[in-house]
Amino acid sequence: MAVRNTGRHAGDTKSRILDAAETLFIECGYEALSLRQITSRAEVNLAAVNYHFGHKESLIHSMLSRRLDPLNEERVKLIDRFDAMLGARLTCEHVLGAMFIPALRLSRDPRVGGKAFLRLLGRAYTEPSSFIRGFLNAHYESVAMRFFDAFQRALPHLPREELGWRLHFAIGALSGVLAGTDSDSLLGEFSQGKPMNDLQLIARLASLIVAALKAPLPDGTQLAAFAAVLGDATDDHGALGTLASAHRDTSGEAAAACAAACDA
């Protein structure tokens, strides 16, 4: 371990601990993260971590809150602004913009995370740890519900459960890309070196997610077609076999068979 600079003040020590925890969390996730790694990266001893945070869980809470609290405050301000301006004319694109714009702004500010911010965001929302999931669900529940309600108003044709699944898939896919990729390099490759501003980037992200969110609900015929594909991919005569046989029924009967097989 490098020799510590005794001239550093307490605020700097606390920031270095948080910075080290953030970097290591992005690199290896919560479960593989140890206090020994953090103290080594921050060039502090364990007593300093205990003094400022008490234990690993409290440190990780502080590390996430430091970035996610300002992000979600800005998100809520923007969705409130869109609501006040548009009312019933609020669209899915506006709701997605309220999610993306603050994140992109913060990722371009080195004082609040800079380029690593998007990777932190992606890691946090793809982290399988129940500890991280519990923290996010409890700490940002009101923000999540605020945006879910906005999506529901913008997409009134979708049942609540269906909307929940679509948002889960769309945001999960985006988070996975952010967590594992240098976004600047990725964008540079896809744009072939051409400059891309925030609005252009948001338009590309939103166009994919909007298409997924606005897709019509599958009917019985579509469900039966998927059932046939699944049945053809296996020799089993269990649930997938039941799904395959549904293709030979009428569309209404096929949907019922699919549902029964999935419930089994």
Image (tube, helix red, strand yellow):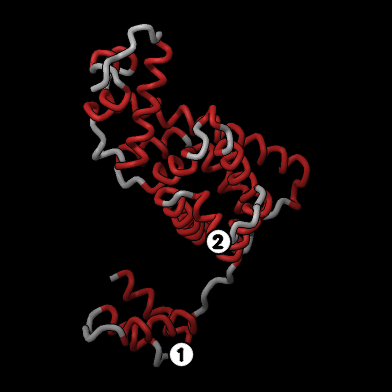
Q: Which residue is mark 2?
A: 190
Q: Residue at x 33, y 8 (%)?
A: 6
Q: Amino acid at mark 2?
A: Phe
Residue 179 image point, x, y percent: 41, 48
Give yes or no for contact between labels 2 and 1 (Cβ–Cβ under 8 Å). no
The reply to whether residue 240 is in sight is: yes
Identify the image quadrant of residue 104.
top right
Looking at the image, tell me whether mark 2 or mark 1 is earlier in sequence order.
Answer: 2
The residue sitting at the bottom extreme is 248
Q: Which residue is nearer to you in this view: 232 or 244?
A: 232
Picture quarter with the C terminus: bottom left
Q: Toward the viewer: 22 or 89?
A: 22
Callout 1: few (<14), some (14-19), or many (20+) C-alpha neighbours within 10 Å? Answer: few
Q: Give neighbour class at mark 2: few <14, some 14-19, many 20+ (Cα, 10 Å).
A: few
Q: Name the kind of residue labelled 1 in the image.
A: Thr
Q: Is residue 228 left or right of residue 80?
A: left
Q: Is residue 19 left or right of residue 209?
A: left
The mark closer to the camera, 2 or 1, is 2
Residue drawn at x 37%, y 15% as measured from the top left: 13
Position in image of residue 160 (x %, y %): 53, 57
Give coordinates of residue 46: x percent, y percent.
23, 18
Place of residue 250 in the rendered image (x, y in percent of width and height, measured from the top left): 46, 90
Residue 26 against residue 216 in the figure, above or below: above
Residue 203 vertical position relative to residue 42 in the rendered view, above or below = below
Mark linked to residue 250 = 1
At 68% across and 38% down in the image, what residue appears?
80
On screen, residue 197 versus residue 6, left or right, reads right
Q: Is residue 154 visible?
A: no
Q: Which quarter shows the N terminus?
A: top left
